[in-house]
Amino acid sequence: MPIRTDRLQHQYRLIRDCLEGEDAIRDQGKLYVPSPDGMSATNYRHYLDRGCWYGAPQATLRALTGIALRKAPVIRLPARLEPMRLNATHENAPLTILIEEMVREVTSMGRFGVLLDFPPAGNSVNTVPHIATFRAESIESFDTAYVDGRRVLTKVHLASDEKFDNSDVYYELSLEGGAVYTFKRFIRDEHKNRVDVGEEVVPTVNGRTLNYIPFAMISPEGRKPEHVTPPMLALCRVALSHFKNSCDREHAIWLTSSPTPVVAGSIPANKVPTTLGSGNLWLLPEGATAFLLEFSGAGVAAQRELMEEKVATMATLGARLVNVSINRNEAPEVAASRTRSELSLLHDVIVNCEEAVNWLLRIAAEWVGASADEVNVTLSKDLIEATMDPRMIEAQMRAWQAGLLSRSTVYENFQQGEIARADRTYEEEKEMIDDEGGDLSSPIIGAKPAA
């Protein structure tokens, strides 16, 4: 049976709305925040408007993406694929933007789809493939099967942004008989029945059909088509619960913050006070009394404490992942080990996004007749800033002078220590030094000055 993702659609929508922010949550109204019993539509609108959204999901995702991409990806491509560096996707985005979108989507939603394809028309001998992207909620269903002993995708249904007769167009990628990749478009009628549109397409490269679907579903757990719980789901659920508490608390304060005047006794209708405040004189009949009702109790304070507990929970679920500080009594190496453990999810996201983009680009190289071995996209796994200090630089140079390290190894250590650029090879750096008149063969530390 096909593996359906219908049960995840609500989760995806919740996360997407939480990441969009306060207005998106309010616009959904009772879907996320039920109306208190007996409340009118007008009062419910005011009730929602008083709530304050705590933007932990957005802040956490921005911080995690920033940490993951604090160093630019190192991208090496064969000459034939160089156009993809600046124009890699169907939306004409460069590879760096595609990688950023991959990291952001997999970190938040737990799934992202990428499809390698040629433009449908206008191709020439110099045309390069492009990558079409699909958000988690666009991946409707998929099938897998074992082909030649390997578990592979055999069918995928994707929601697209195309329209046909004002109906949404869906894509079907399938591996017919486990041997030939085919592509179909279809819509759904008013009864949700499938109606194919257009002709079935059998993509070919250099006159040959493909025996695989050039589509990858990326998750923190690898390029595998299993369902994965969205990483930010728990954080978003707590943020939403916090917003509900905020609506309740603000409503309670609004109801109880102003004292209510009360007059006790028999008062003729024409003697009932109608004004409040200093300068307004009340003349009450004999025996009548007046006083103010004011709220007293711990109900609102209890709501505040509950909200504070949920802020702490959100910190545990999300914000703590971006805390790379060192405790005062904690050794640097202990802090680094602790932080790497906290950032293990982000590390998995980076590794799997890197693997997926390399897989697609190597296929693209084969399609255009270039060498797949020339493709190499590397994302930094150094999630903690670790700039090499001057003493370590001197120690590296002394080890080189003593013959314990090669110049190439020293340069690689400088790259790891964020002294040298990660995207520049030793040969390129040496060439630049030679152009400036320097000499890497001479010792730097301990060299005697010229006479």
Image: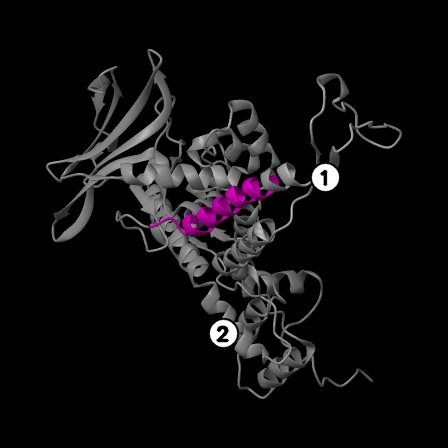
Is residue 88 or residue 398 the one in the foreground?
Answer: 88
Q: Secondary structure at mark 1?
A: strand
Amino acid type for the residue under numbered disc 2: Ser
**Residue most extreme to the right:** 279
Give the labeled residue for mark 1: 292
Left or right side of 365 for 32: right
Decide which of 10, 92 is in the foreground and name it: 10
Residue 405 makes an appearance in the image: yes
Q: Is residue 343 left or right of residue 436?
A: left
Question: What is the number of the mark on residue 337?
Answer: 2
Q: Residue at x 33, y 11 (%)?
A: 165
- Region of the chain picked out in magenta, as a range: 229-250
Residue that sits furthest to the front in the current view: 286
Residue 232 belongs to magenta span: yes
Vertical relation: 222 (above or below) 384: above
Residue 262 in the image, given as x and y percentages of width and height: 70, 34
What amino acid is at disc 1? Leu
- Crowding around mark 1 (Cα neighbors within 10 Å: few <14, some 14 to 19, many 20+) is few
Tell me, yes or no, if residue 115 can be seen here: no
Q: Quadrant of the C terminus?
A: bottom right
Q: Quadrant of the N terminus?
A: top left
Is 287 covered by the magenta stretch? no
Rendered position, 192 above or below 439 = above
